[in-house]
Amino acid sequence: MRLTANEVGALKPLGGSNPLVSALFLTRSLLQVRLSYVSAIPVNVLAVDIGQSGSRVRSTNGFEFSDGPPFIRENGITEAVKKTLLAAGSPKANVLSLSLTGVRGLVPDPHEVGVLCNVITGANSVAVMDDGLAALAGALGGNQGLAIAVGSGVVAVASKDGRVSHRDGDGPILGDDGGGFWLGREGLRAAVKALEDRGPQTTLLTQIESKFGSLYSAIRQQADADIMRWCIEAAPIVLRCASEGDAEAVRIRAGAVSILAETVASAWRGVASLNAQAPASYTGGVLVDAEFREQFFKSVSKVAPNLTWQQPIGDNLDGALFLAQSERKDLPPLLRWWLL
Protein backbone atom coordinates (compact mmCIF):
# COMPACT_ATOMS: atom_id res chain seq x y z
CA MET A 1 0.00 0.00 0.00
CA ARG A 2 1.29 3.50 -0.83
CA LEU A 3 0.49 6.90 0.64
CA THR A 4 -0.21 9.76 -1.71
CA ALA A 5 2.28 12.62 -1.95
CA ASN A 6 -0.13 14.86 -0.04
CA GLU A 7 -0.47 12.29 2.77
CA VAL A 8 3.31 11.92 3.13
CA GLY A 9 3.73 15.69 3.07
CA ALA A 10 1.17 16.10 5.81
CA LEU A 11 3.14 13.75 8.09
CA LYS A 12 6.54 15.45 7.84
CA PRO A 13 5.92 18.69 9.78
CA LEU A 14 4.70 16.78 12.83
CA GLY A 15 8.27 15.73 13.60
CA GLY A 16 9.45 19.29 13.88
CA SER A 17 12.87 20.25 12.59
CA ASN A 18 14.64 17.24 14.08
CA PRO A 19 15.16 14.79 11.18
CA LEU A 20 15.44 11.75 13.50
CA VAL A 21 12.13 12.54 15.20
CA SER A 22 10.56 13.13 11.78
CA ALA A 23 11.79 9.75 10.54
CA LEU A 24 10.58 7.90 13.64
CA PHE A 25 7.19 9.56 13.47
CA LEU A 26 6.85 8.84 9.78
CA THR A 27 7.73 5.16 10.34
CA ARG A 28 5.19 4.83 13.15
CA SER A 29 2.50 6.59 11.11
CA LEU A 30 3.12 4.41 8.08
CA LEU A 31 2.83 1.29 10.30
CA GLN A 32 -0.44 2.52 11.80
CA VAL A 33 -1.88 3.19 8.35
CA ARG A 34 -0.73 -0.25 7.11
CA LEU A 35 -2.24 -2.03 10.14
CA SER A 36 -5.49 -0.16 9.60
CA TYR A 37 -5.43 -1.21 5.96
CA VAL A 38 -4.79 -4.88 6.80
CA SER A 39 -7.56 -5.01 9.40
CA ALA A 40 -9.96 -3.62 6.80
CA ILE A 41 -9.29 -6.50 4.36
CA PRO A 42 -12.51 -8.58 4.27
CA VAL A 43 -12.19 -12.08 5.69
CA ASN A 44 -13.95 -14.63 3.50
CA VAL A 45 -15.34 -17.53 5.54
CA LEU A 46 -16.26 -20.69 3.65
CA ALA A 47 -18.65 -23.20 5.23
CA VAL A 48 -18.95 -26.79 4.05
CA ASP A 49 -21.71 -29.18 5.15
CA ILE A 50 -21.18 -32.84 4.24
CA GLY A 51 -24.02 -35.27 4.89
CA GLN A 52 -25.08 -38.78 3.93
CA SER A 53 -27.12 -37.61 0.95
CA GLY A 54 -24.82 -34.88 -0.40
CA SER A 55 -22.75 -31.81 0.42
CA ARG A 56 -23.11 -28.05 0.16
CA VAL A 57 -20.82 -25.02 0.29
CA ARG A 58 -21.55 -21.40 1.15
CA SER A 59 -19.31 -18.39 1.81
CA THR A 60 -19.66 -14.94 3.31
CA ASN A 61 -18.85 -13.39 -0.07
CA GLY A 62 -21.94 -14.89 -1.69
CA PHE A 63 -20.55 -18.08 -3.23
CA GLU A 64 -22.89 -21.12 -3.08
CA PHE A 65 -22.66 -24.70 -4.26
CA SER A 66 -25.26 -27.35 -3.48
CA ASP A 67 -24.59 -30.42 -5.59
CA GLY A 68 -21.63 -32.00 -3.86
CA PRO A 69 -20.95 -35.70 -3.22
CA PRO A 70 -22.24 -37.51 -0.10
CA PHE A 71 -20.13 -38.69 2.79
CA ILE A 72 -18.91 -42.27 2.38
CA ARG A 73 -17.55 -43.46 5.69
CA GLU A 74 -15.18 -46.01 4.17
CA ASN A 75 -13.34 -43.20 2.33
CA GLY A 76 -12.84 -41.08 5.43
CA ILE A 77 -13.34 -37.42 6.30
CA THR A 78 -10.35 -36.00 4.45
CA GLU A 79 -11.37 -37.63 1.16
CA ALA A 80 -14.96 -36.40 1.58
CA VAL A 81 -13.77 -32.82 2.14
CA LYS A 82 -11.37 -33.03 -0.80
CA LYS A 83 -14.05 -34.27 -3.21
CA THR A 84 -16.52 -31.61 -2.09
CA LEU A 85 -14.07 -28.72 -2.39
CA LEU A 86 -12.90 -29.88 -5.82
CA ALA A 87 -16.49 -30.37 -7.00
CA ALA A 88 -17.21 -26.81 -5.88
CA GLY A 89 -14.34 -25.50 -7.98
CA SER A 90 -11.72 -25.07 -5.24
CA PRO A 91 -13.12 -21.79 -3.84
CA LYS A 92 -10.69 -19.60 -1.92
CA ALA A 93 -11.15 -18.53 1.69
CA ASN A 94 -9.32 -17.19 4.72
CA VAL A 95 -11.30 -19.35 7.15
CA LEU A 96 -12.92 -22.71 6.46
CA SER A 97 -15.66 -24.25 8.62
CA LEU A 98 -16.54 -27.93 8.18
CA SER A 99 -19.86 -29.40 9.37
CA LEU A 100 -19.46 -33.17 9.10
CA THR A 101 -21.65 -36.20 9.44
CA GLY A 102 -19.92 -39.41 10.36
CA VAL A 103 -17.74 -38.09 13.19
CA ARG A 104 -20.36 -39.40 15.64
CA GLY A 105 -19.79 -36.83 18.35
CA LEU A 106 -16.01 -37.20 18.42
CA VAL A 107 -14.11 -34.87 16.09
CA PRO A 108 -10.69 -36.35 15.27
CA ASP A 109 -7.34 -34.54 15.11
CA PRO A 110 -7.94 -31.83 12.47
CA HIS A 111 -4.34 -31.60 11.25
CA GLU A 112 -4.67 -33.72 8.11
CA VAL A 113 -7.89 -32.14 6.89
CA GLY A 114 -6.63 -28.68 7.89
CA VAL A 115 -3.53 -29.01 5.71
CA LEU A 116 -5.67 -30.24 2.83
CA CYS A 117 -8.02 -27.27 3.14
CA ASN A 118 -5.08 -24.89 3.22
CA VAL A 119 -3.68 -26.37 0.00
CA ILE A 120 -7.01 -26.24 -1.85
CA THR A 121 -8.55 -23.01 -0.54
CA GLY A 122 -5.67 -21.09 1.04
CA ALA A 123 -7.46 -21.05 4.41
CA ASN A 124 -5.16 -20.51 7.40
CA SER A 125 -7.84 -21.42 9.96
CA VAL A 126 -10.07 -24.49 9.74
CA ALA A 127 -12.88 -25.41 12.13
CA VAL A 128 -13.91 -29.07 12.12
CA MET A 129 -17.22 -29.80 13.86
CA ASP A 130 -19.88 -32.43 14.34
CA ASP A 131 -22.88 -31.59 12.17
CA GLY A 132 -25.13 -31.69 15.23
CA LEU A 133 -23.30 -28.72 16.72
CA ALA A 134 -23.62 -26.85 13.42
CA ALA A 135 -27.34 -27.65 13.38
CA LEU A 136 -27.76 -26.27 16.91
CA ALA A 137 -25.90 -23.04 16.14
CA GLY A 138 -27.76 -22.55 12.86
CA ALA A 139 -31.24 -23.40 14.06
CA LEU A 140 -31.09 -21.24 17.20
CA GLY A 141 -28.85 -18.48 15.87
CA GLY A 142 -26.09 -19.28 18.35
CA ASN A 143 -28.35 -19.34 21.41
CA GLN A 144 -28.46 -22.19 23.92
CA GLY A 145 -31.25 -24.74 23.80
CA LEU A 146 -31.79 -27.88 21.75
CA ALA A 147 -31.79 -28.77 18.08
CA ILE A 148 -32.39 -32.05 16.31
CA ALA A 149 -31.31 -32.72 12.76
CA VAL A 150 -33.37 -35.35 10.97
CA GLY A 151 -32.10 -35.92 7.48
CA SER A 152 -30.83 -39.26 6.24
CA GLY A 153 -29.32 -39.61 9.70
CA VAL A 154 -30.26 -38.22 13.09
CA VAL A 155 -28.38 -36.18 15.67
CA ALA A 156 -29.59 -34.09 18.60
CA VAL A 157 -27.45 -31.57 20.47
CA ALA A 158 -28.42 -29.55 23.52
CA SER A 159 -26.59 -26.78 25.41
CA LYS A 160 -27.33 -25.00 28.64
CA ASP A 161 -25.15 -23.04 31.09
CA GLY A 162 -21.92 -24.27 29.56
CA ARG A 163 -22.95 -27.91 29.31
CA VAL A 164 -23.37 -29.68 25.98
CA SER A 165 -24.87 -33.07 25.18
CA HIS A 166 -24.84 -35.05 21.94
CA ARG A 167 -27.19 -37.92 21.12
CA ASP A 168 -27.31 -40.44 18.25
CA GLY A 169 -25.46 -39.66 15.04
CA ASP A 170 -24.26 -43.24 15.44
CA GLY A 171 -24.58 -44.28 11.82
CA PRO A 172 -27.21 -46.32 9.97
CA ILE A 173 -26.33 -49.71 11.48
CA LEU A 174 -26.22 -48.84 15.18
CA GLY A 175 -28.18 -45.59 15.20
CA ASP A 176 -29.69 -42.75 13.17
CA ASP A 177 -32.99 -44.07 14.47
CA GLY A 178 -36.11 -42.42 13.09
CA GLY A 179 -34.27 -40.60 10.30
CA GLY A 180 -34.57 -40.85 6.55
CA PHE A 181 -32.43 -43.96 6.20
CA TRP A 182 -34.37 -45.67 8.99
CA LEU A 183 -37.73 -44.74 7.44
CA GLY A 184 -36.72 -45.96 4.00
CA ARG A 185 -35.23 -49.17 5.35
CA GLU A 186 -38.38 -49.98 7.30
CA GLY A 187 -40.47 -49.20 4.22
CA LEU A 188 -38.36 -51.51 2.06
CA ARG A 189 -38.61 -54.24 4.67
CA ALA A 190 -42.39 -53.93 4.78
CA ALA A 191 -42.51 -54.08 0.98
CA VAL A 192 -40.32 -57.18 0.83
CA LYS A 193 -42.44 -58.90 3.48
CA ALA A 194 -45.59 -58.09 1.53
CA LEU A 195 -43.95 -59.39 -1.65
CA GLU A 196 -43.09 -62.71 0.01
CA ASP A 197 -46.37 -62.95 1.91
CA ARG A 198 -44.56 -62.67 5.25
CA GLY A 199 -46.38 -59.52 6.30
CA PRO A 200 -49.42 -57.34 5.63
CA GLN A 201 -50.14 -56.17 2.11
CA THR A 202 -49.22 -52.53 1.66
CA THR A 203 -49.20 -49.85 -1.02
CA LEU A 204 -45.53 -49.42 -0.14
CA LEU A 205 -44.83 -52.40 -2.39
CA THR A 206 -46.38 -50.89 -5.52
CA GLN A 207 -45.01 -47.41 -4.77
CA ILE A 208 -41.48 -48.67 -4.18
CA GLU A 209 -41.53 -50.94 -7.22
CA SER A 210 -42.72 -48.05 -9.38
CA LYS A 211 -39.53 -46.23 -8.44
CA PHE A 212 -36.95 -49.02 -8.22
CA GLY A 213 -38.40 -51.79 -10.38
CA SER A 214 -39.02 -55.38 -9.33
CA LEU A 215 -38.02 -55.88 -5.71
CA TYR A 216 -37.72 -59.63 -6.26
CA SER A 217 -34.98 -59.03 -8.83
CA ALA A 218 -33.46 -56.10 -7.02
CA ILE A 219 -32.80 -57.75 -3.68
CA ARG A 220 -31.00 -60.58 -5.47
CA GLN A 221 -29.06 -58.58 -8.04
CA GLN A 222 -28.29 -55.17 -6.53
CA ALA A 223 -25.10 -54.52 -4.58
CA ASP A 224 -25.37 -53.62 -0.91
CA ALA A 225 -24.32 -50.05 -1.71
CA ASP A 226 -27.32 -49.69 -4.00
CA ILE A 227 -29.67 -51.00 -1.32
CA MET A 228 -28.20 -48.49 1.15
CA ARG A 229 -28.93 -45.69 -1.31
CA TRP A 230 -32.45 -47.00 -1.84
CA CYS A 231 -33.08 -46.79 1.90
CA ILE A 232 -32.49 -43.05 1.75
CA GLU A 233 -34.50 -42.56 -1.45
CA ALA A 234 -37.46 -44.58 -0.15
CA ALA A 235 -38.09 -42.30 2.86
CA PRO A 236 -40.35 -39.84 0.98
CA ILE A 237 -42.37 -42.79 -0.34
CA VAL A 238 -43.03 -43.98 3.22
CA LEU A 239 -44.19 -40.53 4.33
CA ARG A 240 -46.40 -40.13 1.26
CA CYS A 241 -48.03 -43.53 1.81
CA ALA A 242 -48.54 -42.68 5.49
CA SER A 243 -50.33 -39.45 4.57
CA GLU A 244 -52.56 -41.51 2.28
CA GLY A 245 -53.47 -43.81 5.16
CA ASP A 246 -51.54 -46.97 4.37
CA ALA A 247 -51.48 -48.93 7.64
CA GLU A 248 -47.89 -50.15 7.38
CA ALA A 249 -46.57 -46.71 6.45
CA VAL A 250 -48.55 -45.13 9.32
CA ARG A 251 -47.03 -47.68 11.71
CA ILE A 252 -43.51 -46.92 10.49
CA ARG A 253 -44.05 -43.15 10.77
CA ALA A 254 -45.40 -43.51 14.32
CA GLY A 255 -42.36 -45.56 15.27
CA ALA A 256 -40.00 -42.92 13.92
CA VAL A 257 -41.79 -40.13 15.77
CA SER A 258 -41.63 -42.03 19.07
CA ILE A 259 -37.93 -42.81 18.66
CA LEU A 260 -37.06 -39.19 17.82
CA ALA A 261 -38.95 -37.94 20.88
CA GLU A 262 -36.84 -40.21 23.07
CA THR A 263 -33.69 -38.91 21.40
CA VAL A 264 -34.74 -35.35 22.18
CA ALA A 265 -35.53 -36.27 25.80
CA SER A 266 -32.14 -37.94 26.21
CA ALA A 267 -30.28 -34.94 24.78
CA TRP A 268 -32.15 -32.50 27.01
CA ARG A 269 -31.63 -34.68 30.11
CA GLY A 270 -27.91 -34.40 29.42
CA VAL A 271 -27.90 -30.67 30.26
CA ALA A 272 -31.09 -29.96 32.27
CA SER A 273 -34.17 -31.45 33.84
CA LEU A 274 -36.88 -32.54 31.42
CA ASN A 275 -39.16 -29.82 32.80
CA ALA A 276 -36.64 -27.02 32.18
CA GLN A 277 -37.65 -24.29 29.75
CA ALA A 278 -35.64 -23.57 26.61
CA PRO A 279 -36.02 -22.88 22.91
CA ALA A 280 -35.76 -25.84 20.56
CA SER A 281 -35.62 -26.19 16.82
CA TYR A 282 -34.96 -28.64 14.02
CA THR A 283 -33.28 -29.09 10.66
CA GLY A 284 -33.26 -31.79 8.00
CA GLY A 285 -35.45 -32.89 5.15
CA VAL A 286 -37.61 -35.39 7.05
CA LEU A 287 -39.09 -32.69 9.29
CA VAL A 288 -40.09 -30.66 6.24
CA ASP A 289 -43.07 -33.04 6.02
CA ALA A 290 -45.85 -31.17 7.87
CA GLU A 291 -47.73 -34.24 9.17
CA PHE A 292 -44.55 -35.86 10.41
CA ARG A 293 -43.44 -32.65 12.10
CA GLU A 294 -46.80 -32.13 13.84
CA GLN A 295 -46.80 -35.66 15.22
CA PHE A 296 -43.20 -35.25 16.31
CA PHE A 297 -44.01 -32.11 18.30
CA LYS A 298 -46.94 -33.84 20.01
CA SER A 299 -44.77 -36.79 20.97
CA VAL A 300 -41.97 -34.59 22.32
CA SER A 301 -44.41 -32.53 24.41
CA LYS A 302 -45.16 -35.65 26.45
CA VAL A 303 -41.54 -36.13 27.53
CA ALA A 304 -40.08 -32.59 27.50
CA PRO A 305 -43.12 -30.32 27.87
CA ASN A 306 -41.33 -27.01 28.35
CA LEU A 307 -39.26 -26.99 25.20
CA THR A 308 -40.59 -24.20 23.00
CA TRP A 309 -40.33 -25.29 19.39
CA GLN A 310 -39.60 -22.68 16.76
CA GLN A 311 -38.81 -22.66 13.09
CA PRO A 312 -35.07 -22.82 12.45
CA ILE A 313 -33.33 -19.49 12.01
CA GLY A 314 -30.77 -21.15 9.75
CA ASP A 315 -29.31 -24.49 8.71
CA ASN A 316 -26.02 -26.32 9.18
CA LEU A 317 -24.19 -23.97 6.84
CA ASP A 318 -25.42 -20.94 8.78
CA GLY A 319 -24.33 -22.62 12.00
CA ALA A 320 -20.90 -23.44 10.60
CA LEU A 321 -20.48 -19.84 9.44
CA PHE A 322 -21.57 -18.53 12.84
CA LEU A 323 -19.17 -20.74 14.78
CA ALA A 324 -16.29 -19.91 12.45
CA GLN A 325 -16.77 -16.21 13.13
CA SER A 326 -17.00 -16.70 16.90
CA GLU A 327 -14.08 -17.25 19.26
CA ARG A 328 -11.58 -19.68 17.78
CA LYS A 329 -11.62 -22.04 20.70
CA ASP A 330 -11.98 -25.81 20.76
CA LEU A 331 -15.18 -27.29 22.17
CA PRO A 332 -14.18 -30.91 22.58
CA PRO A 333 -15.31 -33.38 21.49
CA LEU A 334 -17.63 -31.56 19.04
CA LEU A 335 -15.40 -28.79 17.62
CA ARG A 336 -11.67 -28.59 16.98
CA TRP A 337 -9.61 -25.91 15.22
CA TRP A 338 -6.62 -26.22 12.94
CA LEU A 339 -4.56 -23.01 12.80
CA LEU A 340 -1.64 -22.45 10.44
Image (tube, rainbow, N blue to C red):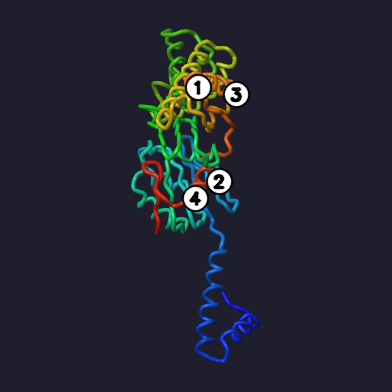
Kind of residue sitting beneath label 4: Ser
Tell me the tag on residue 290.
3
Can residue 327 be seen in this snapshot? yes
Residue at 57% across / 12% down in the picture?
245
The answer to whether the residues at label 4 and label 2 have Cβ atoms under 8 Å apart is no
Kind of residue sitting beneath label 1: Val
Is 272 or 329 nearer to us in this picture?
272
In space, the residues marked 1 and 2 are separated at their CA atoms by 34 Å
Position in image of residue 232 (x %, y %) = 47, 28
The part of the image, by quadrant, that contains residue 164 is top left
Residue furthest to the right in view is: 6
Mark 4 or 2, nearer chain start: 2
Tell me the tag on residue 300.
1
Quadrant for the N terminus in the image:
bottom right
Mark 2 or 3, nearer chain start: 2
Q: Residues within 10 Å of mark 1 (few under 14, many from 20)?
A: many
129 relative to 285 in the view: left or right = left
Mark 1 or 2, nearer chain start: 2
In space, the residues marked 3 and 4 are separated at their CA atoms by 34 Å
Tell me the tag on residue 326.
4
As displayed, is residue 170 above or below residue 96? above
Tell me the tag on residue 65.
2
Which mark's residue is nearer the viewer, 3 or 4? 4
As displayed, is residue 66 above or below residue 253? below
Kind of residue sitting beneath label 2: Phe
